[in-house]
Image (cartoon, grey):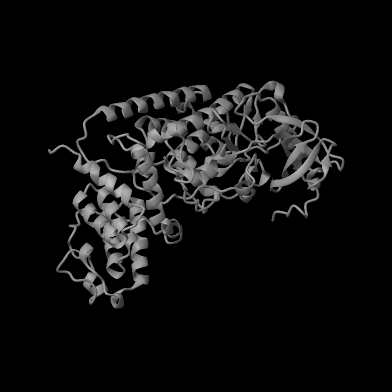
Amino acid sequence: MRNTPEADEYIGKTLARKYRVEALIGEGGMGKVYRTRQLALDKPVVLKVLRQSLLSDERTVARFQREAKAASRLNHPNSISILDFGQAEDGALFIAMEFVQGQDLHQLLSREWPLAEARVVRIVSQVLSALSDAHGAGVIHRDLKPENIMLEQRRNEPDFVKVLDFGIAKITDAGGDDGPALTRAGFVCGTPEYMSPEQARGALIDHRSDLYAVGVILYQLTTGVLPFESDSAVGFATKHLTEEPLPPSKRRPEARISPGMERLILRALSKNPDDRPANAEAFKAELAAVDRERRRGDASARRAPLTQPPVPMSSPVLAPLPRRAAGAADTDTNPGTDPGWGSNEPTVEATVRAVPELMQTLQNPMPESDRTESIVPNAPDEAGGFGFFKALTITLVLAALAIAAYYYHTFYAGPRPDEPFSLPANAPVPGQLAGNPQGPDLSKPLYEQEIPVQHRNAQASREHEREGDRQTQRGNLGLAATEYKKAFQFDPKPELSLKLGEVYWQSNRVDEARSWWSRHQKDRPNSKALPYIEQALKSVAAMPPP
């Protein structure tokens, strides 16, 4: 449990006559991380302090010293800078490093997914640059994950990357002998969600193990989920060793993932290190080529005539992201470098149950350079164009589906067989008479019906709506429409007519979508979704006749 600032032994004190401790950023089993002020230069600095109780543990002290040694070898703009290594008056060892004002990549994913592919390329290219420098200095990171990647918003450099925490780094060159081995033969260290197969086996690893972790991060950035899911460290390790990841476009069909990006991600996740990019620089070059290929495809799509209605990207409920074991709360109110041991020590158990916050797109819009990447293909690009409406869509539909984030993880059942989308718009809902015999009038379409208050059942409606949300998440739009209609029969909420309109729109059933959206407008004339609906339907009206 985290100490309060008042109870902490170092808050307000000056260590080594150089660093005045201002605030606790995070802590874990090995020690604590503080925001301090370097007195000589009057600037903020992060201090990592080893616990007093561990000073007698030679292996822990050696690891701590190795972190300082490994990081001090690095001299790259995208790697955290080590400023000092020393001992406080009470004997405690510390590492001083630069303070980064920003958020880590885990927080960005939780708050702002989906990310434009151009933004993904910009972030990951910087990570690869930092790795290239580290690998060239004979340092393998071994614990690369979103929590160890900080993003700083500089004036002319958005999403400026700093790679943190070389606490379990491996120094590979002959001149970097650390003395006695710090890990036992066959010992596995790292974070299970991001481990390469060879790392999970406890085998000898090289720089290509870090590139596998980059592949996992790319998969997560483009899909919002990890390539494998498990409730235990052993489960993750087993899947990395034995299972092939589902292609990102199959895992999240509604996400806009370019073919080149998908090919590169799957190469990086190859079980055989020889099948991955040869090194970080080669990986970065391939990533740049993917970005050029995507841009050419986007330019061709904008020049092509409109032949079919644009299908907006649906707004999925974000799947779980690994969460830090400690230090997460502080960064929300006290952003900055957080290389706390709670998040950066080798993870013992996978933490995949965290439900990320719904992103606040309108309050935190993407930079203008990224917004063009979110434009619906073939849509006009005027005065904000579809970039604005894409952001609006994600915000509004996520707001309508907000409850699904909770229920997806609470009530998730195993996958069901897909059902073809062949449900006529006006057909009776299966089980309608049995479920609510006195409710709807089956002589007219469901979207025109008024369900008497005395015949409504809010609880039954919620249960069917939850199932509809689950089927939407799985891409089973036919089953989703059936469940949403059952829910509407029990309680005709405007949120349900909005969802039904979106399900039919995603299935290119424009007339049915228009009918359900009209019902939504009737029930909620001041709905914030109306600009998006109007723009979507205008794009259909502007189509030339077949």
Query: Viewed as shown, does residue 487 lie left or right of 274?
Result: left
| Camera-side residue of 487 and 545 | 545
Residue 203 image offset from top left, x and y in percent: 58, 35
Q: Residue at x 43, y 39 (%)?
A: 222
| Camera-side residue of 180 and 99 | 99
Residue 297 image offset from top left, x and y in percent: 32, 27
Q: Quadrant of residue 182?
A: top right
Quarter the N terminus occupies: bottom right
Query: Viewed as shown, does residue 253 lie left or right of 430?
Result: right
Q: Is residue 284 above or below residue 39?
A: above
Residue 278 image offset from top left, x and y in percent: 49, 23
Marker count (numbered):
0
Residue 546 image offset from top left, x and y in percent: 12, 38
Q: Quadrant of residue 292?
A: top left
Work out which residue is located at the far left of the displayed protein and give it.
546
| Camera-side residue of 137 and 503 | 503
Residue 399 visible in image: yes
Residue 63 visible in image: no
Q: Residue at x 36, y 25 (%)?
A: 293
Query: Viewed as shown, does residue 113 lie left or right of 486?
Result: right
Work out which residue is located at the far right of the displayed protein and give it.
89
Q: Is residue 30 above or below residue 471?
A: above
Query: Viewed as shown, does residue 316 lie left or right of 344?
Result: left
Q: Is residue 466 above or below residue 348?
A: below
Q: Residue at x 29, y 65 (%)?
A: 488
